[in-house]
Image: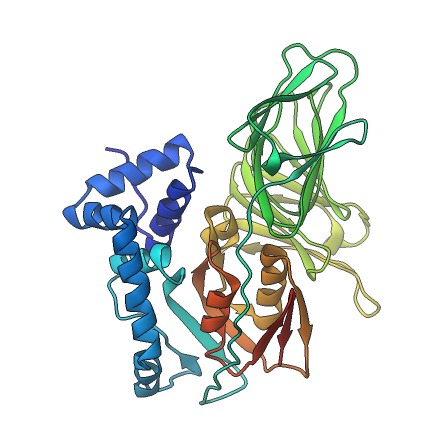
């Protein structure tokens, strides 16, 4: 039997993406194996697909919230090590059901307030709402024309120097068997509130997070395969020993053969991070100073992350390698999750900005709040804020602007 993941958040993600028709064949096999593993799993799957059961779950969650049971549950728990524990009174199986059917939050979200020993302040609830991001992107062809992929039907959508470009169920693929002449370049861009999966002409699979892009030739010719990215991108590279795969950002170059890795190169983050899951990657800063050991290239092995700091007026850039404690945290976005373990408030807000296509403004300077926990990305913004408002921060949503007080 096909093995299935034991992590309830991954199961919940599979269930949600199945309802959206977005599972790969391997993911569908994992979900089928999980459903068949026990009667409880099958019962949960039945309720997920039962509209009446969905309404009952939503009503139950609303009653649980309005009754103040959650507040009393939190108040009765002693604060230890500055950690406020919030757990819905459910087993993980029913937490997964709630995750899919009701508020869309996980069975737990730990909130760590490093600036306060005790105490919480409820935030201001908002009647407005913003839906989560979805699959979609803009394809820019070699002649500069643009196609909005999530508004197009299935079928062949373009031909670039003999390479046929096909859209199937909002996924793009290339057939370069008849490619002629110099390879044209295409660019896929995901605006805020969009993510996308594409199969490149060599079979390499690419996942783009929100506010990201990848530029690539429609046929890989010559001695290497070279692409250029911005934002955050996950790669599962097809192995071609005779044709290395090169990824460029504005500040670093990555050289691989066949491997899977994640690159976070957002311009508004303090570092550029490359995390290797399988294979090997050579990381080289663009501004290499061979006399400075901090800037020489690094070769990663699985489970390592290369961190390139960005220069400022006080410090020079440096390239370091760290051990990746939880690779799943790095790729959570690809699996439909926010993973906020060890993440500060400002980093959380930057993620919400990109996924919900909002602007974040600050009034005053919030305390140094550190999160620990997971949330589903297929969740309306108001539901995310209901959870985040359990710490000493007040949120107010005005149109597409989230004000953090």
Horizontal side, residue 318 vs residue 104: left or right: right
Q: Position of residue 338 (x, y in %)?
A: 49, 58
User: Where is 184 relative to 255, above or below?
Assistant: above
At x 65% / y 30%, what residue is drawn?
A: 245
Of residues 152 and 136, the one drawn nearer to the viewer in this rendering = 152
**Quarter in which the N terminus is drawn:** top left
At x 68% / y 17%, what residue is drawn?
A: 163
Of residues 251 and 105, the one drawn nearer to the viewer in this rendering = 105
User: Where is 268 relative to 64, above or below?
Assistant: above
At x 46% / y 66%, what residue is drawn?
A: 383
Q: Position of residue 359 (x, y in %)?
A: 68, 65
In the figure, residue 129 lies in which quadrant?
bottom right
Q: Can the viewer see residue 153? A: yes
**Quarter in which the C terminus is drawn:** bottom right
In the figure, residue 351 lies in which quadrant?
bottom right
At x 57% / y 28%, what residue is drawn?
A: 153
């Amino acid at each position: 039997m096909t093995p299935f993941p034991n992590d309830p958040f991954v199961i919940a993600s599979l269930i949600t993406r199945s309802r959206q028709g977005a599972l790969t064949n391997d993911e569908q096999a994992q979900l089928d194996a999980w459903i068949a593993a026990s009667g409880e799993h099958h019962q949960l799957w039945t309720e997920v697909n039962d509209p009446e059961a969905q309404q009952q779950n939503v009503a139950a969650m609303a009653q649980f919230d309005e009754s103040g049971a959650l507040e009393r549950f939190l108040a009765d728990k002693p604060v230890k090590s500055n950690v406020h524990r919030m757990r819905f009174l459910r087993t993980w199986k029913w937490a997964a059901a709630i995750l899919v059917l009701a508020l869309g939050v996980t069975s737990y979200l730990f909130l760590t307030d490093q600036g306060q020993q005790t105490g919480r302040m409820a935030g201001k609830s908002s009647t407005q709402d913003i839906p989560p991001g979805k699959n979609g992107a803009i394809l820019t062809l070699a002649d500069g024309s643009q196609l909005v992929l999530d508004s197009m039907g299935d079928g062949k959508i373009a031909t670039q120097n003999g390479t046929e470009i096909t859209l199937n169920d909002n996924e793009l693929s290339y057939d370069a068997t008849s490619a002629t002449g110099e390879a044209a370049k295409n660019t896929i861009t995901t605006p805020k509130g969009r993510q996308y999966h594409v199969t490149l002409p060599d079979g390499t699979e690419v996942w783009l997070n929100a506010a990201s892009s990848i530029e690539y030739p429609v046929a890989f010719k010559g001695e290497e395969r070279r692409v250029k990215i911005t934002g955050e991108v996950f790669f599962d590279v097809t192995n071609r020993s005779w044709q290395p795969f090169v990824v460029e950002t504005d500040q670093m170059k990555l050289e691989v053969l066949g491997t899977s890795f994640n690159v976070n190169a957002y311009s508004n983050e303090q570092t550029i991070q490359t995390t290797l899951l399988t294979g090997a990657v050579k990381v080289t800063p663009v501004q290499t100073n061979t006399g400075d050991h901090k800037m020489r290239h690094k070769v990663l092995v699985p489970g390592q992350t290369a961190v390139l700091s960005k220069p400022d007026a006080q410090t020079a850039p440096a390239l370091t390698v760290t051990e990746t404690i939880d690779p799943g945290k790095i790729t959570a976005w690809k699996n439909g999750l926010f993973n906020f373990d060890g993440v500060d408030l400002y980093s959380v807000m930057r993620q919400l900005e990109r996924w919900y296509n909002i602007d974040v403004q600050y009034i005053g300077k919030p305390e140094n709040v550190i999160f620990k926990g997971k949330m589903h990305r297929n969740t309306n913004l108001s539901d995310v804020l209901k959870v985040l408002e359990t710490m000493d921060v007040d949120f107010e949503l005005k149109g597409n602007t989230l004000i953090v007080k």
